[in-house]
Image: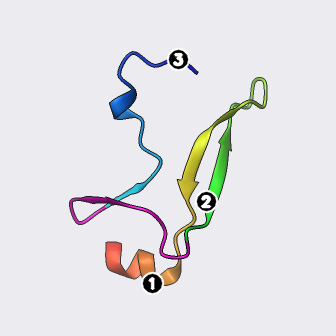
Amino acid sequence: MSLKRSSLFRQQCHIDGTWVDASDVLTIEVTNPADRSRLGTVPSLTRGDVRQAI
């Protein structure tokens, strides 16, 4: 994947003004449905992570 501004591509969650990974460091792969290529990942948040975000 080619991006003009790669700094805008984040593979973390924005919680309380900070970019963070999931506390258990697990991720979910994000794929392009057209060709099934890997686009990136997103954190697989735990219940505790979600409570912190709320």
What residue range appears in magenta?
15-24
Vertical placement of residue 7 versus 1, above or below: below
Q: How far, Cα to Cα, is label 2 from label 1?
A: 15 Å
Q: Is residue 21 magenta?
A: yes
* Quadrant in the rendering for residue 49: bottom left
Is there any visible trace of residue 12 in the rendered image?
A: yes
* Label at residue 2: 3
Vertical placement of residue 12 versus 49, above or below: above
The amino acid on which the numbered mark 1 sits, given as a three-letter code, is Gly
Q: Which residue is mark 2?
A: 27
Q: How far, Cα to Cα, is label 3 from label 1?
A: 34 Å
Q: Which residue is mark 1?
A: 48
Secondary structure character of the magenta stretch overall: loop
Residue 27 spot, x, y in % from top left? 61, 59
Query: Outermost residue, left direction?
Result: 17
Q: Classify mark 3: helix, strand or loop.
A: loop
Q: Residue at x 43, y 75 (%)?
A: 50
Residue 31 spot, x, y in % from top left? 69, 38
Closer mark to the observer between disc 3 and disc 1: 3
The quarter of the image holding the N terminus is top right
**Mark 3 or mark 2, earlier in chain:** 3
Q: Is residue 29 magenta?
A: no
Residue 25 spot, x, y in % from top left? 55, 68
